[in-house]
Image (spheres, grey):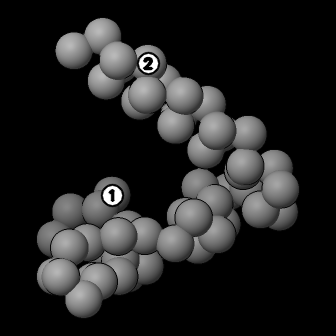
Amino acid sequence: MNEHHQPFEEIKLINANGAEQWSARQLGKLLGYSEYRHFIPVLTRAKEACEKQWSHN
């Protein structure tokens, strides 16, 4: 397995429908955020970017 993907695989969760998902708190730690509150603005910007992209389609 690619060493760059392995950490993401280690924290991956599988929901009841079999879909892959990740905990935002675990993902923040993996990406180097010392506290979840510092990761929240990143999540907010990502969500806004996705919403903007989908509104243009």
Residue 3, quarter of picture:
bottom left
Q: Is residue 52 visible?
A: yes
Q: Which residue is mark 1?
A: 4
Residue displayed at 43% across by 70% down: 22
Nearest to the eye among marks 2 and 1: give it.
2
How many C-alpha atoms fall within 10 Å of the one at disc 2: few (<14), some, or many (≥20)? few
* Residue 7 % position (x, y): 40, 71
Quick one: quadrant of the C terminus?
top left
Report the front residue among 29 and 1.
29
Residue 42, quarter of picture:
top right
Give me the C-alpha separation between circle 2 and circle 1. 29 Å
Which kind of residue does numbered mark 2 sit on?
Lys
Would residue 41 be found to the left or right of residue 25 on screen? right
Residue displayed at 59% across by 55% down: 31
Q: Compare marks 2 and 1 and give the one earlier in the sequence.
A: 1
Q: Residue furthest front?
A: 55
Which kind of residue does numbered mark 1 sit on?
His
Would residue 38 be found to the left or right of residue 39 on screen? right
| Vertical arrangement, residue 43 with respect to residue 6, above or below | above
Tag count: 2
Residue 50, quarter of picture:
top left
How many C-alpha atoms fall within 10 Å of the one at disc 1: few (<14), some, or many (≥20)? few
* Residue 40 % position (x, y): 72, 49
Q: Is residue 3 visible?
A: no
Residue displayed at 16% across by 82% down: 18
* Residue 23 % position (x, y): 52, 72
Quick one: quadrant of the N terminus?
bottom left
Q: Which residue is mark 2?
A: 52
Report the front residue among 10 and 4.
10
| Vertical arrangement, residue 32 with respect to residue 6, above or below | above
